[in-house]
Image: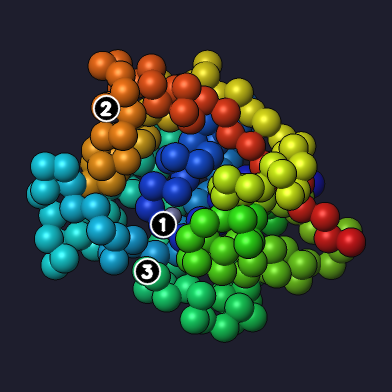
Amino acid sequence: MSEHVVVIYPHPDDEAFGASGTITTFREKGIPVTYLCGTLGEMGRNMGNPTFATRETLPEIRKQELIKACEVLDVELKMLGYRDKTLEFESREEVATNLYSYLKEIKPSLVITHYPGYAVHPDHDAFGAAAIRAVEMFPEEERPTVWAQAISNDHVEILGNPQIQNDVSAVFRKKFESIMAHKSQADGMLSKVKNESDDVELAAKTWLGTESFYIWNFE
Ligand SMILES: [Zn+2]
């Protein structure tokens, strides 16, 4: 099986904050990466800091930011067009079937998604669960590996240490660039580090310098 990584997250910027260092490492090895992005994050509360978006302009702004971030990371982007903050109300089986239709074309070797139940946001939990269900639809011998990302504060306590811990400090410049592509979100997210340090990039590196994943067990 040739290597191809598929990243499945619900929001523009999940890839940048969560996996852009890992994505960069794969791209540097020439491994293709496709991002299946569930929504446009159009219900988000961040409107830029200082504010430059409105409820009406936010969907298009976030779409352009997402396209830019994917150019920075050199990944193929598929926008799935679900509505933001409603994924938990969609039928898991229908979302999984839709995701599977992409996966069976791409035939990935690895799928990266959120760890359901430990991913803090209902969209993350629901989309992660649907992604894992989609991978389960493959015959066992064709199933890609799944790396599931937990975010909640209690995840190490409950799940133990993640098997994959990628130190992405060597490619942090690229990660920071992809985060900054999401301008409407980044300024708000980074303002908390800004309060603690003058060097935002350095502070962000301490905060976001490792990307961790659990290898999903289908047994
Ligand atoms: Zn998100």
> Quarter holding the C terminus?
bottom right
Find numbered disc 1 in the image and state the secondary structure of the residue it sits on.
Answer: loop
Sequence order check, earlier mark of 3 and 2? 3
Mark 1 in CB contact with mark 3 (< 8 angstroms): yes
Which residue has dot 2 on it?
195
Q: Relative to residue 40, is residue 195 depicted above or below? A: above
Find numbered disc 2 in the image and state the secondary structure of the residue it sits on.
Answer: loop
Mark 2 sits near ligand 1, with its Cβ under 8 Å away: no
Which residue has dot 3 on it?
84
Which amino acid lies under the numbered mark 1 shown in the image of this protein? His
Residue at left 24%, top 38%? Answer: 187
Q: Relative to residue 22, is residue 52 depicted above or below? A: below
Asked if residue 52 shows in the view, the reply is yes
Q: Position of residue 218 (x, y in %)?
A: 83, 60
Mark 1 sits near ligand 1, with its Cβ under 8 Å away: yes
Viewer-nearest of labels 1 and 2?
A: 2
